[in-house]
Amino acid sequence: MSGFRRGVRLGIDVGSARVGVARSDPDGLLATPVETVARDENSVPRVALLAQEHAAVEVLVGLPVNLRGEDTPSTTDARAFAADLARAVPLPVRLVDERLSTVSAHAALRQSGRSQKSSRGIVDQVAAVILLQNALDVEKRTGSAPGTPVSPDEEPD
């Protein structure tokens, strides 16, 4: 773990109705679910509070690009959420590629025997765990921080 920066990270899966939140342990070994936050005017302040409560050193927001790596309306929404979050927390906020994390989360829940309906409340947390775990693994493998930093000054597209 030569280039791994120690400290708790939060992983955020931004959806139109819910925001999934996951956290890592300080050594970045394991990402675990934290909470599903309703998507409304309180979602950014709630995520900011969770970052404070968990003494996070960084927040990683999933960037849902399509399979060709192109932006979609969800990508624009995630960028705007990340910029709002960067203004709300005194921490680095980074956007990380989360292609297929929600698809992987649904597949994992299906394999565990949960129906789509019974998974609705936790699928966002599972997606956040997947994107965070992938980001931690990338950092350990490359020695570089994953994704791209978000500036609090950024205006959404």
Image (cartoon, grey):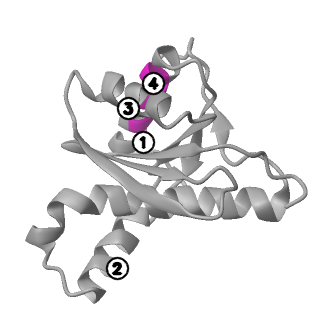
- Name which quarter of the figure residue 114 lies in: bottom left
Say the numbered circle drawn on residue 47. Answer: 3
| Horizontal arrangement in the rendering, residue 154 relative to residue 29 (left or right) | left
**Dots 1 and 4: beta carbons under 8 Å?**
no
* Mark 4 burial class by Cα count in 10 Å: few <14, some 14-19, many 20+: many
Tell me which amino acid carries mark 1: Thr
Quarter of the figure that contains the C terminus? top left
- Name which quarter of the figure residue 138 lies in: bottom right
Q: List x then y, in percent, for residue 29.
A: 65, 64
* Mark 3 / mark 4, whichever is N-terminal: 3
**Dots 3 and 4: beta carbons under 8 Å?**
yes
Indicate the secondary structure of the residue bearing disc 1. helix
Per the image, the residue denoted by label 1 is 75
Q: List x then y, in percent, for residue 152.
A: 56, 15
Q: List x then y, in percent, for residue 144.
A: 81, 49
Of labels 3 and 4, the one closer to you: 3
| Horizontal arrangement in the rendering, residue 26 relative to residue 22 (left or right) | right
Of labels 3 and 1, the one closer to you: 3
Assess whether residue 82 is covered by the magenta stretch.
yes
Of labels 1 and 2, the one closer to you: 2
- Extent of the magenta region: 78-85
Say the numbered circle drawn on residue 85. Answer: 4
| Horizontal arrangement in the rendering, residue 13 relative to residue 54 (left or right) | left
Tell me which amino acid carries mark 3: Val
